[in-house]
Every structure is written in structure tokens, then in C-alpha cells.
Image (spheres, grey):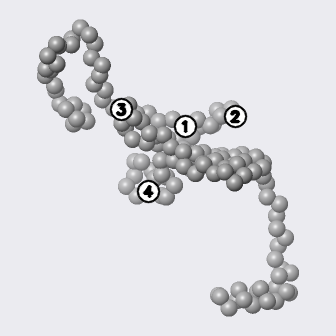
Amino acid sequence: MPDLLALFTEDPDLCKILPKPAILNTNFVQFFKTTNLVRIRRNNTMMTIFGGTDKQTIISSGRSTVASFITFRKGKAILKYLRFSTDFISTGYFRSDGLKKEGNKYILSQKIEAPYYQPLPAKPKRADGNYQHSKSTDGYF
């Protein structure tokens, strides 16, 4: 194969059979429902929104294991990996449960269930702070 490439570049007649370059479409929105991905392009501004994951499987596929869900480019400026992380109840990165289109909006969502232990209402508070705990659902207590 390397020899054929050299032959191809040296023979001008072979270059005549190449198709003419197509003009790229620089203004589009393409929503791929099966993979929960949307590509938007407006001239030199491009965005990818990804709402798919493989979080329930053992074998996963590249992009679906990454917690980033938006990439954005405007000219030479690139935002490669936008991701959110919960801090208050510490359940890790936001991983979308899919991507829905409603009108001209694309909506990502995730349902999170986690135990929450505070604040304790004023009435049952004890001055010494000594409370009997039952086993927590997440094994924390």
C-alpha cells in the first residue's frame, strides 16, 4: 500500500479521477436520537450535546463513559469538556438519562436518589448531640 500512494501522487492522470471536493454545510442541526447526541453548527461556531451513557453496563463504549456532555467551538477557541459534579450530597458527576428535544430546546436530565441526614428540625434536637442511629441505606452510618 505505501508504494501505491507514491504512484498515485506521481501520476497526474490518476488525480483526474478524484471527485471534486464538496462544499461543507456550515449551517445545520442534526439530532441523533439513537445515541442521544445533537450536533449544531453555525458557520465557525459548533456545539455537540451528548446525553447518552453506558452507566448501567459493564462493557462500555468510549464517549458513553465520559461525564462531559457539551463541547463547544467558536473559531479557534475550544471548550472541550463541560461537566457538572454534585457537591452538596456528593453523588459524583452529572450523567444524563438521555436527551429530549422540546421545541428548539434540548433537555438533559438525571434523577438522583441519595440519603440526606441534615438539618434536623429544632424540636427533636438534643443538647448533647447523642442520637441513636439506625443503619443507613448507603452504609454511611
Distance in Å between CA atoms under marks 4 and 2: 30 Å
* Residue count near mark 1 (Cα–Cα under 10 Å), binned few <14, some 14–19, many ≥20: some
Distance in Å between CA atoms under marks 2 and 3: 32 Å
**Residue 16 visible, this angle:** yes
| Helix, strand or loop at mark 4 | loop
Residue type, mark 1 in image: Leu
Which residue does the numbered mark 4 point to in the structure image?
60
Check the picture and name the quadrant holding the N terminus: bottom right
Left or right: residue 53 versus residue 80 is: left
Distance in Å between CA atoms under marks 1 and 4: 20 Å
Residue type, mark 4 in image: Ser
| Helix, strand or loop at mark 2 | loop
Which residue does the numbered mark 1 point to in the structure image?
108
Distance in Å between CA atoms under marks 3 and 4: 26 Å
Q: Is residue 133 above or below residue 81?
A: above
Q: Position of residue 140 (x, y in %)?
A: 22, 35
Picture residue at 65% right of the left edge, 34% below the top: 105
